[in-house]
């Protein structure tokens, strides 16, 4: 077995990388990650510098990988460690650079240890240790694994990483026949509210289109990119993805890219971009240039739920945060990350903090479950 680091995914054939990806996860695909690199959405400019760990067997076949990045900021992580950075600064210790295993700008749970099906059982531990060795090679303060799937999280915990717990809001498909069937399991009040919100969009004369990647024209990608940028104009941060990147993944990932456009007459006024795996729809970006009541809910939530039901997808992850999602069928779901800090005193302090934070997050999720929109007899289905 040979393990080394890779600074550009285009040095690897896409087929070799993609065979390691489970569930057809679009964010972990060679097309998505290499596209980020090719269009300079990651790199020095954005603070995500590729430093992937890859493993080959004796025949030079790729058998394992870790998507890994050298970071000089916290932008696009969605697991917030600002207080840790501030504590380092108060003690005159640099927190950056750090290493992060994640999909840039994407708070979606998935593989962080990409493994061949016939991989040696010792390979996961070897990849984790190789990633940890990069802390010293790159003179970093720490190594963070963001949104790993459960099997990877257990391996990381076994290797001594601290586990952190977060909370998102996900929708689960319980075999609904159509959107009306979904509405029937909600309480009367929530069901009426959703119908009212959807009706207001229709009465505003808005038309919704659901387009898969190859169906989207360059002009539509340009328009959606303008919506995407508008979101950042209204909030903090800056847009890192380009219209050319959107167009490329629309072509290369095909039906795994789902664009929802809202139009009034001949003019597109808002849009939401989703990506899908074999089982899950992921809501990622939204933007608009005109405001309409409830259009955000229709475009980002209801159209996605309807799409999942039609396509037989099991889960809809609409992105980070948002307690308002509960009333629309999304329930609290625990997410996780894993962390290793090289400074022993800070590592101990963070471990103590996480033990208390984890209890608070679980209590928070438990409390929010009390506000479930589902009828009592359907809540535990």
Image (cartoon, helix red, strand yellow):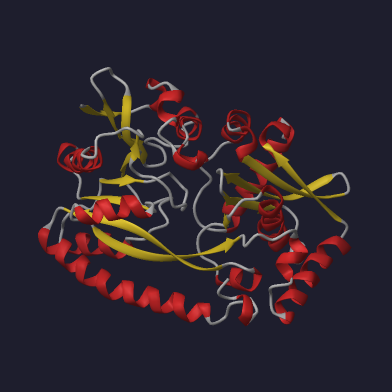
Q: In which quarter of the image is residue 266?
A: top right
Q: Which of 220 and 3 is in front in this view?
A: 3
Q: 308 left or right of 35?
A: right
Above-or-below relation of 360 to 87:
below
Left or right: where does residue 281 sit relative to residue 164? right
Q: Residue at x 63, y 52 (%)?
A: 286
What residue is rendered at 25% in x and 41% in y?
124
- Say if 7 sits above or below 221 in the image: above
Residue at the image point whose x is 25% and y is 72% from the top: 355
Residue 85 screen position, x and y as percent = 26, 59
324 shown above or below 152:
below
Outermost residue on the top side: it is 59
Q: In which quarter of the image is the N terminus?
A: top left
In front of the other: 7 or 88: 7
**Residue at position x 37%, y 27% in the image:** 8
**Is 230 left, or right, of 144 in this rendering?**
right
The image shows residue 100 at horizontal and vertical percentages of: 31, 46
Where the C terminus falls, by quadrant? bottom right
User: Residue 16 appears at what percent x and percent y?
Assistant: 41, 25
Residue 55 in the image: above or below residue 317: above
Query: What percent of the width, then of the height, locates residue 314?
Result: 58, 54
């Amino acid at each position: 077995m040979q393990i080394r680091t890779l600074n550009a995914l285009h040095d690897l054939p896409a087929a070799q990388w993609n065979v390691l990806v489970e569930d057809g996860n679009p964010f972990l695909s060679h097309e998505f990650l290499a596209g980020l690199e090719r269009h300079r959405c990651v790199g020095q400019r954005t603070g995500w510098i590729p430093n992937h760990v890859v493993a080959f067997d004796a025949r030079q076949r790729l058998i394992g990988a870790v998507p890994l990045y050298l970071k000089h900021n916290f932008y696009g992580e969605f697991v917030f460690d600002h207080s840790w950075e501030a504590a380092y600064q108060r003690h005159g210790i640099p927190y950056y650079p750090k290493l992060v295993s994640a999909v840039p700008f994407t708070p979606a749970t998935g593989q962080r240890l990409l493994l061949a099906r016939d991989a040696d059982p010792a390979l996961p531990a070897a990849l984790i240790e190789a990633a940890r060795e990069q802390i010293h090679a790159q003179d970093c303060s720490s190594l963070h694994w963001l949104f790993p799937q459960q099997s990877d999280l257990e391996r990381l915990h076994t290797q001594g990483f601290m586990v952190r717990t977060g909370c998102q809001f996900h929708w689960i498909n319980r075999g609904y026949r159509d959107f009306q069937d979904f509405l029937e399991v909600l309480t009367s009040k929530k069901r009426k509210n959703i119908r009212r919100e959807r009706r207001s969009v229709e009465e505003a004369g808005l038309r919704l289109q659901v387009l898969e990647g190859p169906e989207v024209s360059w002009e539509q990608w340009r328009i959606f990119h303008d919506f995407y940028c508008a979101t950042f104009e209204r909030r903090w941060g800056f847009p890192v993805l380009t219209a050319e990147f959107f167009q490329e993944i629309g072509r290369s990932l095909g039906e795994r890219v789902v664009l929802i456009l809202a139009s009034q007459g001949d003019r597109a006024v808002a849009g939401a971009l989703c990506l899908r795996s074999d089982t899950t729809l992921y809501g990622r970006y939204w933007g608009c240039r005109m405001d309409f009541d409830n259009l955000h809910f229709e475009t980002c939530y209801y159209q996605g739920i309807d799409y999942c039901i039609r396509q037989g997808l099991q889960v809809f992850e609409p992105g980070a945060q948002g307690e308002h999602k509960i009333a629309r069928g999304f329930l609290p779901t625990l997410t996780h990350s894993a962390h290793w800090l090289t400074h022993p005193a800070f590592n101990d302090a963070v471990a103590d903090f996480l033990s208390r934070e984890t209890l608070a997050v679980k209590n928070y999720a438990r409390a929010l479950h009390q506000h479930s929109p589902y009828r009592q007899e359907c809540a535990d289905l």
